[in-house]
C-alpha cells in the first residue's frame, strides 16, 4: 500500500467538497474492493474520504411503493432486514449471497454499485428491478447508470446517497458462483412488475451487466420456467476466462434464469 | 496411563497455543534493529537481463542496500542446489542448470528473483523495489512441455533440448513380452494437474548476523531446519555449520513446500552480514503463488496388458514431468524414485517399465507436494485399473480383488518390497461402509431427479517412512534419511524429548509425548517436545513423506529403551538389588519377587544426586540419544470410495459420500490420524475438482490469487466415513506406517473414477470443474439419451 491522506467528513456535502479538493481522491465505504486493490498496489489514491461517519447515509425504509436503501447500508443489513424481506425478498436473498460473512459485514450497497464490478451481484438487481441511483446532485436510472466494466455514469466528485427500488410483484436471483472467487460467474436477476418483465445478467457480459431481452420476451408470454425451454442465449459478447467459456456462460444464463423464475414464482 | 498413552485420542497439546493466538511463527519474531527485504521479481517468463540500475531505489527513503546476483558472486555465495542426482538411461548424469539465488544474466520464470532491496520498513523496501530499473530483453516463454522438448527455445545452456533427464525403471524386455502376449490392452493419456501448495502461513525468513562471534542465525519457515543449515553451509557457503544456527519456530503448514531451501532465506541470511543488521522477509500470497515450489504437473501415457480373464500381465508408463525453470531441492527425485516404484499399486504385476523425462519450462520450480510422486503414481494405476475393468465389463471391485497382492513379503518389479498388508480386508470393509450394494438404487433415485450418480474406487498404496539411508544413497540421494532423538530426563522425572522431526501442524507435541507417556508411565503434561532449532537438537532430517511417526518416533523409542536400561542400573543401586532383578512396569522400577519399587521420578532423582553409586561404576545423569535408520520403507494402503452426483444442467459435481478405509499399522492417536485423513482427502478433492495452476502462453501466471486459484472449502466436502484395518508394520519398533499423505494420494482417482462412472465412462481431466464436466456431459449426451 502507498501512503495516502485520510479524511472523515460528517456530511455528504463535506464529502463532495473533499473529493473536489483532492484530485484522484477516492471515497471509502466498506473498503472491500478498494482496500485489497490498494494493498496489492494496483490503486494508489492520494486521499481517502471515508463515508463511515457521514450521518443518515445508512438505513432501509419504505417510501410509498419504493424500497429506499442508504448508500452505506451493509450487505448483511439488507440480507437480514425484515423490511426488505417483506418488500422484495429476492433482494434480501441476493445480498445474503455476496462474498462471505466478513465481506457482508463491511461491504456496502453504494460501494458495490459505484464499483460496478462485472461479476458483482447488485448491478443485476438494480437493472432488473429498475432502481434509481440517487446521488448528491441527481437521480440516475439504473438503465443509464452502468456504462461498462467498472464504469458508471458517476461524474468526478459525485457521491451515491441512496438507491430506490420500486416494489415488484415477483423477483428472485439465481447465482452460479465462480468456483474460486465466489463472485457471480453467471448471476440472473428476474423481476416482474405487472407486464413489465426484466431479466438482468451479471458475471457474463464482457461489457458488464446487461438485460437478456430474448429471455424477457419469452417470459412475457407466460412467467414460467417452461417458457424458457428451447430459448437459447447467444454467446456473442460474453466473457471467456479459465473458469468458463462464452458458450458455457451462455448456457448457464438459461439455466440460472429458469431457476430464478422458479424461485420468483414460489415467493 | 492408558488415557494419554499409545492409542488414546488425546487432544492436541499445541492447540491451546495456536487457537489463542499465542503461536510464535517466524513473522511474529522481530529482532532489534531489524530491516526488511523486498524482492524485485521478473515480470517476464524468460528474458536476458541487460542492465540493472538501482540508483533511484538507492536514493529512496530508508533504503540501505540493493543487492543483485553479482554481489552474491562477489561474496562467493553459491547457487541453490538439487540434492538428488538422477542418471539418464545411458548412465550419464542429469543436466542441472545453475540456480543462483539472485538471477545472473537471465530470468527464467515470472517471479524469478532479480534483486533485493533492503530498507528500514517493509513499505519503504517495497516502494524502492518498484524503482529498481531492470533492462530486460524478452525471450520466448516455453510453458508447454512438448514445446520445450523441441529445444527451439533453450532455458539452460546445459540442457539444449530442455530435457533434464531421460530416466527409466523396470524391465523393458519383460514388459514388452507381457504386452506381446496380452489379450487386451487398456491405454490412457493422463494429465496430473499442477498445484500451488498454499500453506496457511506464507514463507518468511529473518537473517541475523552477530559480528562479535562471526555467527549467523536464520529464523525460517522450514520443515527441516537441519537440512537447511547443511545446504546453506556446505553447499551455498553462508558459514560453517557451527557458525550458523537455523530456527524453525511454529510453522503453519508446509505440505512439502517448506522442505526446500529457497532464494529468499538464502538472501536474508547473507544480506544480514552485508548490511550489518537483521533482515526480514515475509512472503505475501501473490509471491507464494509465484515462487513457492509447485507440485505435480505430469503428462503420462500409460498402458496395461491383460490376459483373457482380466489378470494384469504388465504395465508400461511414459511420463513427462514438468520441473519448472530450475531444479528445486528434491525436485529430481519426485517424478522418478518417489513415483515409478509405486506403480505396482496394490497389484501383482509381473512386469513394469516406466520412462520419465524431466523437462525445464519457464514456470516456477516444481517439487514435492503432499504425497510427492505417490499421488501421481496412484492416479496412473487407479485410473488404468478402473478403465480396464470397465472395458472388460468386469466389476471394478472384483477386478481389483482378483489382481491384489496376497502374499507378503512381495517384491515388485520396481524396487519396492512390500512387507505386509491385507488389501482385501480394506476393500471389503469399505464396500460395506459405503453401502455399495445400495448404490444402484441411489443411482435410480438420482436419475429420477435428473441427476447423474457415479461411484469411484481408489485402492492406493504408498511408501512412507523415508528412508533406509543406504538404499536412497544408492539411488542418488545426497543425504541419509534416518532420524535422531535425545531424551533428557530432569531430576524430578519430567522429560524433554529433542527430535529431528519438525512439526508444522502434525501434532508431534502430542503424539510424541504419548509415546513417552506410554513407555515411561508418566502423564503427557510432564513431557515437552523440543524441535526446530539446530542449537538444541543436534541433527535431524525433518518432516515430510509421512516419516515422522515411522522414523522420528522410532528414534525416540530407541532412546527411551536406553533411558529405561540406564534407569534399571540406577534403580538397582538405589534399592541394593541386582540389575537383572529390576523390572520396569507402569512407571515403576521394581525388584522382582519383592514389593520394593521406586517410581520413575525417584529413579531420575537418584541418577542425578548420584549418592548410591560411585561415578566410576555408573555415570550420573539420565539422558540418552539415538539415531534410527529404517530398514525398509513402510507401506500404508487403503481403499477409498467416492460417490458423486452430477447436475447435468450446470456440470456441478457434488460429493455425496466418502468412505475411507486405511491401514496405517498401529495408530498412536486416532483423532489426529483421522484429522490427517480428512485434510488429505480435502486436498485430493481440491486437486480433482478445483485446483490448478495455469500459465498463459506468454508464461504469465493466471492463477496468482484466490480470485482464480480455487481452494477446497468445507462446503465442497461431505462428512467422511473413516475406518481402519491394521496390519502392523514389521520393520519399525512401533508397528506404525504413516498417515499424513494418504488422503491426498487416494482421493484424486476416486473422484475421477466416480465422475467418469456417472458420465458413462467419458474421460475427464483434473480439475473436473463445472465447465469441464458440463462439456463432458455435452459430448456424452447422445449416448446418455440412447440408454
Ligand atoms: C472476498 C470478497 C468476496 C466478494 N464477493 C462478492 C460477491 O460475491 N458479490 C459481489 O457483488 N461483491 C463481492 N465482493 C465485493 C463486495 O461486495 C464489496 O463490498 C463491494 O464491491 C464494494 O463495496 P464497499 O462498500 O466495500 O466499497 P469500497 O471498497 O469502499 O469502494 C469501492 C469503490 O466504490 C467507490 N464508492 C464507495 N462508496 C461510494 C459512494 N457512496 N459513492 C460513490 N462512490 C463510492 C469507492 O470510491 C471505490 O472506488 C467481494 C469482496 C471480497 C473482498
Image (tube, helix red, strand yellow):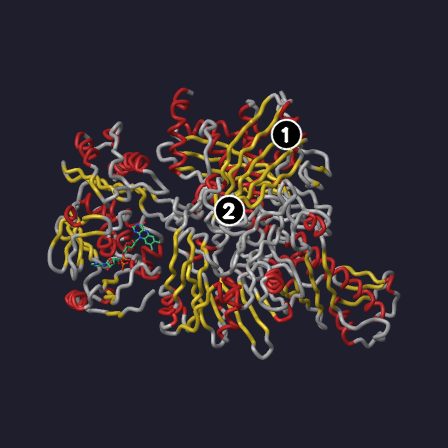
Q: Is residue B679 visible?
A: yes
> For mark 1, what is the residue?
B314
Q: Is residue B705 visible?
A: no
Where is residue B697 shown, x and y percent of the image?
Answer: 39, 44
- Left or right: residue B122 compared with residue B616: left
Q: Residue at x 88, y 65 (%)?
A: B578
User: Would you call the spot at circle 2 few (<14 residues within 10 Å), some (14-19), or many (20 or more)?
Assistant: many
User: Would you call the spot at circle 1 few (<14 residues within 10 Å), some (14-19), or many (20 or more)?
Assistant: many
> For mark 2, what is the residue?
B360
Q: Taking B337 as reference, is B786 above or below it?
A: above
Report the disc number at residue B677: none
- Left or right: residue A132 compared with residue B618: left
Question: What is the distance, in whole Å, between disc 1 and disc 2 at their CAs?
Answer: 30 Å
Q: Return the residue nearer the eye: B626 or B608.
A: B626
Report the chain holding disc 2. B
Specify the quadrant that holds the C terminus of chain B. Answer: top left
Where is residue B727 shown, x and y percent of the image?
Answer: 69, 42
Mark 2 Cβ and ligand 1 under 8 Å apart? no
Amino acid at each position: 500500500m502507498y501512503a495516502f491522506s485520510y479524511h472523515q467528513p460528517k456530511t455528504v456535502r463535506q464529502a463532495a467538497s473533499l473529493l473536489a479538493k483532492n484530485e484522484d481522491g477516492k471515497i471509502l465505504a466498506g473498503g472491500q474492493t478498494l482496500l485489497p486493490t490498494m494493498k496489492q498496489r494496483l490503486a494508489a489514491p492520494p486521499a481517502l474520504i471515508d463515508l463511515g461517519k457521514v450521518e443518515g447515509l445508512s438505513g432501509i425504509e419504505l417510501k410509498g411503493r419504493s424500497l429506499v436503501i442508504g448508500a452505506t447500508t451493509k450487505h448483511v443489513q439488507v440480507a437480514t432486514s425484515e423490511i426488505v424481506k417483506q418488500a422484495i425478498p429476492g433482494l434480501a436473498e441476493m445480498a445474503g449471497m455476496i462474498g462471505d460473512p466478513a465481506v457482508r459485514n463491511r461491504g456496502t450497497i453504494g460501494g458495490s454499485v459505484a464499483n460496478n464490478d462485472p461479476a458483482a451481484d447488485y448491478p443485476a438487481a438494480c437493472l432488473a428491478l429498475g432502481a434509481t441511483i440517487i446521488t448528491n446532485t441527481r437521480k440516475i436510472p439504473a438503465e443509464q447508470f452502468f456504462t461498462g466494466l467498472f464504469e458508471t455514469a458517476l461524474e468526478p466528485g459525485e457521491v451515491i446517497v441512496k438507491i430506490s427500488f420500486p416494489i415488484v410483484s415477483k423477483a428472485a436471483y439465481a447465482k452460479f458462483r465462480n468456483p474460486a472467487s465466489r463472485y457471480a460467474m453467471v448471476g440472473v436477476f428476474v423481476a416482474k412488475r405487472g407486464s413489465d418483465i426484466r431479466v438482468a445478467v451479471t458475471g457474463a457480459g464482457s461489457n458488464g451487466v446487461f438485460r437478456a431481452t430474448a429471455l424477457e420476451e419469452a417470459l412475457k408470454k407466460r412467467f414460467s420456467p417452461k417458457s424458457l425451454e428451447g430459448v437459447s442465449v447467444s454467446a456473442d459478447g460474453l466473457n471467456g476466462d479459465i473458469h468458463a467459456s462464452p458458450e458455457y456462460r451462455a448456457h448457464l444464463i438459461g439455466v440460472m434464469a429458469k431457476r430464478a423464475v422458479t424461485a420468483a414464482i414460489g415467493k | 496411563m492408558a488415557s494419554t498413552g499409545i492409542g488414546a485420542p488425546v487432544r492436541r497439546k499445541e492447540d491451546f497455543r495456536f487457537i489463542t493466538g499465542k503461536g510464535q511463527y517466524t513473522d511474529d519474531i522481530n529482532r532489534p534493529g531489524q530491516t526488511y527485504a523486498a524482492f524485485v521479481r521478473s515480470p517476464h517468463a524468460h528474458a536476458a537481463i541487460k542492465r540493472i540500475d538501482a540508483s533511484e531505489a538507492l536514493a529512496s527513503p530508508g533504503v540501505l542496500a540493493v543487492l543483485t546476483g553479482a554481489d552474491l558472486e562477489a561474496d562467493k555465495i553459491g547457487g541453490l542446489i538439487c540434492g538428488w542426482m538422477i542418471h539418464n538411461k545411458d548412465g550419464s548424469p542429469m543436466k542441472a542448470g545453475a540456480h543462483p539465488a539472485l538471477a545472473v544474466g537471465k530470468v527464467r520464470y515470472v517471479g524469478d528473483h532479480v534483486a533485493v532491496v533492503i530498507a528500514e520498513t517493509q513499505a519503504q523496501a517495497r516502494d524502492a523495489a518498484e524503482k529498481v530499473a531492470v533492462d530486460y530483453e524478452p525471450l520466448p516463454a516455453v510453458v508447454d512441455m512438448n514445446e520445450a522438448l523441441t529445444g527451439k527455445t533453450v532455458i539452460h545452456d546445459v540442457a539444449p533440448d530442455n530435457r533434464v533427464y531421460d530416466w527409466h525403471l523396470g524391465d523393458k524386455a519383460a514388459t514388452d513380452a507381457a504386452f506381446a502376449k496380452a489379450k487386451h490392452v487398456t491405454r490412457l493419456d493422463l494429465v496430473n494437474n499442477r498445484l500451488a501448495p498454499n500453506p496457511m502461513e506464507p514463507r518468511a525468513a529473518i537473517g541475523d548476523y552477530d559480528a562479535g562471534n562471526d555467527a549467523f542465525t536464520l529464523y525460517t519457515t522450514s520443515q527441516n531446519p537441519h537440512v537447511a543449515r547443511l545446504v546453506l553451509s556446505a553447499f551455498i557457503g553462508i558459514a560453517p555449520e557451527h557458525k550458523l544456527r537455523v530456527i524453525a519456530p511454529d510453522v503453519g503448514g508446509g505440505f512439502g513446500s517448506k522442505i526446500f531451501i529457497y532464494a529468499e532465506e538464502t538472501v536474508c541470511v547473507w544480506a544480514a552480514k552485508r548490511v550489518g543488521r537483521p533482515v526480514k522477509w515475509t512472503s505475501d500470497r501473490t509471491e507464494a503463488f509465484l515462487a513457492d515450489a509447485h507440485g505435480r504437473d505430469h503428462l503420462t501415457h500409460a498402458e496395461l496388458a491383460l490376459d483373457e480373464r482380466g489378470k494384469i500381465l504388465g504395465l508400461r508408463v511414459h511420463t513427462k514431468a514438468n520441473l519448472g525453470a530450475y531444479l528445486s531441492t528434491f525436485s529430481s527425485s519426485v517424478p522418478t524414485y518417489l513415483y515409478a516404484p509405486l506403480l505396482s499399486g496394490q497389484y501383482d504385476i509381473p512386469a513394469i517399465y516406466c520412462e520419465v523425462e524431466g523437462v525445464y519450462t519457464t514456470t516456477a520450480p516444481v517439487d514435492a507436494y503432499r504425497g510427492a510422486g505417490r499421488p501421481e503414481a496412484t492416479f496412473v494405476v487407479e485410473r488404468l485399473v478402473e478403465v480396464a475393468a470397465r472395458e472388460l465389463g468386469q466389476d471394478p471391485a472384483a477386478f481389483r480383488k482378483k489382481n491384489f497382492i496376497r502374499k507378503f513379503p512381495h517384491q515388485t518389479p520396481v524396487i519396492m518390497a512390500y512387507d505386509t498388508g491385507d488389501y482385501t480386508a480394506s476393500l471389503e470393509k469399505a464396500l460395506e461402509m459405503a453401502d455399495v450394494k445400495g448404490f444402484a438404487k441411489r443411482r435410480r433415485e438420482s436419475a429420477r431427479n435428473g441427476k447423474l450418480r457415479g461411484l469411484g474406487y481408489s485402492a492406493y498404496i504408498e511408501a512412507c517412512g523415508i528412508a533406509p539411508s543406504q538404499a536412497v544413497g544408492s539411488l542418488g540421494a545426497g543425504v541419509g534419511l534416518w532420524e535422531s532423538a535425545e531424551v533428557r530426563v530432569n531430576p524430578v522425572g519430567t522429560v524433554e524429548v529433542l527430535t529431528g522431526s519438525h512439526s508444522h501442524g502434525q501434532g508431534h507435541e502430542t503424539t510424541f509425548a504419548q509415546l513417552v507417556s506410554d513407555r515411561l508411565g508418566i502423564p503427557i503434561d510432564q513431557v515437552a517436545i523440543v524441535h526446530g532449532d539446530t542449537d538444541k537438537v543436534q541433527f535431524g532430517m525433518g518432516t515430510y513423506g509421512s516419516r515422522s511417526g515411522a522414523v522420528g518416533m522410532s528414534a525416540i523409542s530407541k532412546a527411551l529403551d536406553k533411558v529405561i536400561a540406564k534407569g534399571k542400573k540406577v534403580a538397582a543401586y538405589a534399592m541394593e538389588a541386582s540389575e537383572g532383578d529390576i523390572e520396569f512396569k507402569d512407571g515403576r522400577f521394581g525388584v522382582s519377587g519383592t514389593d520394593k519399587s521406586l517410581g520413575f521420578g525417584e529413579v531420575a532423582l537418584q541418577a542425578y544426586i548420584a549418592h548410591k553409586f560411585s561415578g566410576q561404576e555408573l555415570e550420573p545423569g539420565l539422558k540418552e540419544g539415538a539415531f534410527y535408520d529404517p530398514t525398509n520403507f513402510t507401506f500404508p494402503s487403503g481403499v477409498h470410495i467416492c460417490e458423486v452426483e452430477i447436475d447435468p444442467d450446470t456440470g456441478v459435481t457434488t460429493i455425496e459420500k466418502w468412505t475411507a478405509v486405511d491401514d496405517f499399522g498401529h495408530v498412536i492417536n486416532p483423532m489426529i490420524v483421522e484429522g490427517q485423513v480428512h485434510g488429505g482427502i480435502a486436498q485430493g478433492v481440491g486437486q480433482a475438482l478445483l485446483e490448478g495452476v495455469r500459465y498463459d502462453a506468454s508464461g504469465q501466471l493466471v492463477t496468482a490469487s484466490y480470485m482464480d486459484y480455487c481452494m477446497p472449502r468445507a462446503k465442497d466436502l461431505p462428512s467422511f466415513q473413516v475406518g481402519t484395518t491394521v496390519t502392523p508394520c514389521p520393520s519399525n519398533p512401533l508397528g506404525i506406517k504413516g498417515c499424513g499423505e494418504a488422503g491426498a494420494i487416494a482421493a484424486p482417482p476416486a473422484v475421477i473414477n466416480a465422475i467418469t462412472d456417472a458420465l458413462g465412462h467419458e474421460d475427464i481431466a483434473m480439475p473436473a470443474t463445472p465447465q469441464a464436466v458440463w462439456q463432458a456431459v455435452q459430448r456424452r449426451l447422445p449416448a446418455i439419451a440412447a440408454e
